[in-house]
Amino acid sequence: MSFTDEKIKVLNGLLNQYEFSTGFTYYSFKNEVSDTGSFSKHDINLSGSDPFSKKELSSGGNFALFPIVFDYFDAVLDKKLSVSNMKFEKKKSMLFNSNRHDNVIGFLENETFSKALELRNKIIHNNMTMSEGTGEISLPSGQKYRIVDFSFLNRLVFNIALMCSQNKSYSLYQKSAALSIHEKLFGITLPDAVKSLYQNGKLVQMNTCARIYRAPRKTL
């Protein structure tokens, strides 16, 4: 096994224990049932795994783990592009020039790697400003990130890397969910080739919000 393969295996095993590894999101719509005459709502798990079996991280924990999540994406790209010991900017150029045969996947991989690379470098080299009052970090480029949103960032970066490593196609739901997270984090204007997919019904608009876990109450 090559060093890159070993690195991917180890990092995947490490990160797969956390809740953000369950997919771009593990629930979508609400299902109403009325067995007792009153309506209760249940989230539908679409990820194929039980999110309650995964470890949760605080906002600070997700922030601290982000550079490792980026390292996983970087290792996946090393294997995908058949490179090693290549400077980040050259690797990014190779990625942007590769043909994914899918406008959405190409956009997600390119822009997420680019933004994650910038953020990773500023965190590693402490070239950023953190405001405890607003709970934000500001980069020299002017880009701002809320600490509470690093759970979304880890979810986006990890699952794009996972799909890339497995060379999987995205379902309509996965594309729409990933684009929703991407827009929430980065606010980047979509290219026309992606915008047109919403108009043609090949993508659906989604809103992204955090799910709050509550521990069950103890009975006496």
Image (cartoon, rainbow, N blue to C red):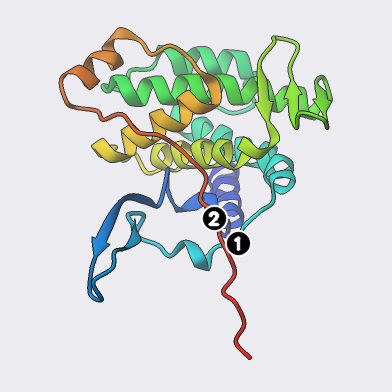
Q: Which residue is mark 2?
A: 19
For image coordinates 58% across by 21% down, the residue present is 115
Q: In terms of image quadrants, where is residue 177?
A: top left
Q: Nearer the viewer, residue 148 or 190?
A: 148
Placement of the C terminus among the 4 image quadrants = bottom right
Q: Tag 1: Cα neighbours inside 10 Å, few (<14), some, or many (≥20)?
A: few
Q: Nearer the viewer, residue 139 or 135?
A: 135
Q: Please provide percent x and percent y for residue 174.
A: 33, 39
Q: Which residue is mark 1?
A: 55
| Distance between mark 2 and mark 1 Cα atoms | 6 Å
Q: How many marks?
A: 2
Query: Relative to residue 182, is residue 119 drawn left or right?
Result: right
Residue 191 badge: none
Q: Is residue 102 above or below residue 214?
A: above
Tell me residue 72's x, y (percent). Answer: 58, 40
Task: Tell me which label, 2 or 1, sits earlier in the chain.
Answer: 2
Please rate how many residues cluster around mark 2, counting C-alpha atoms within 10 Å: few if below 14, some from 14 to 19, many from 20: many
Q: Furthest-bottom residue in view?
A: 220
Q: Are marks 2 and 1 in contact (CB under 8 Å)?
A: yes
Secondary structure at numbered mark 2 = helix
Residue at x 32%, y 54% (from the top left corner): 46
Q: Is residue 164 left or right of residue 117?
A: left
The local secondary structure at tag 1 comes to loop
Location of residue 218 in the rendering, given as x and y in whole percent from the top left corner: 62, 82
Q: Residue at x 60, y 44 (%)?
A: 3
Determine the residue positioned at 16% across, 25% down: 201
* Residue 208, percent from left and from top: 44, 37
